[in-house]
Image (cartoon, rainbow, N blue to C red):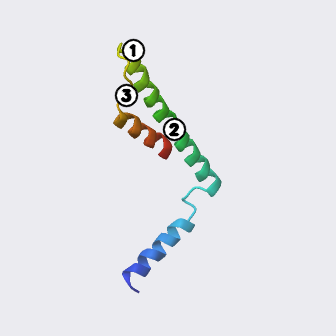
C-alpha cells in the first residue's frame, strides 16, 4: 500500500470513530462560536465609536478601522 492510501484510511477510520461529536452537536457548537465572534466584533466596533465620540472630536474612526471591523463582523 502506498502512504497516501494509509493516510486516507487512517483519516476515514478517525472520522467514523466515536471520538468525534455527532453532527447536531457539532452544528450547535459552531453556531455558539460564530455568535460569540459576532458579539465580540460588535462590541469592538461599538467601543471604537464610543471612544471616538468621547474624545471631544467630531471625527469617526478611520476608514481602515471601519473596514477591518466590518469585514471581521461579516465574516464571523
**Which residue is identified by label 1?**
54
Give the percent coordinates (x, y) of residue 39: 52, 34
Say what secondary structure mark 2 lies in.
helix
The disc, 3 or 2, on the residue closer to the chain's N-terminal end is: 2
Q: CA distance from mark 3 to mark 2?
A: 20 Å
Q: Callout 3: 10 Å neighbours few (<14), some, many (20+)?
A: some
User: Is 37 on the left or on the right of 61, as rendered?
Assistant: right
Q: CA distance from mark 1 to mark 2?
A: 24 Å
37 or 60, which is in the foreground?
60
Residue shown at 39%/25% (left/top)?
A: 60
Say what secondary structure mark 3 lies in.
loop
Residue shown at 36%/35% (left/top)?
A: 63
Q: Callout 1: 10 Å neighbours few (<14), some, many (20+)?
A: few
Question: Could one spot residue 73 in this view of the protein?
Answer: yes
**Which residue is identified by label 2?**
38
**Which residue is identified by label 3?**
61
Amino acid at each position: 500500500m502506498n502512504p497516501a492510501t494509509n493516510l486516507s484510511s487512517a483519516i476515514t477510520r478517525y472520522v467514523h470513530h466515536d471520538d468525534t461529536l455527532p453532527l447536531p452537536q457539532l452544528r450547535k457548537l459552531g453556531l455558539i462560536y460564530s455568535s460569540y465572534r459576532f458579539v465580540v466584533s460588535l462590541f469592538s466596533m461599538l467601543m471604537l465609536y464610543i471612544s471616538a465620540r468621547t474624545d471631544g472630536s467630531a471625527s469617526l474612526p478611520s476608514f481602515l478601522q471601519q473596514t477591518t471591523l466590518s469585514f471581521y463582523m461579516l465574516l464571523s
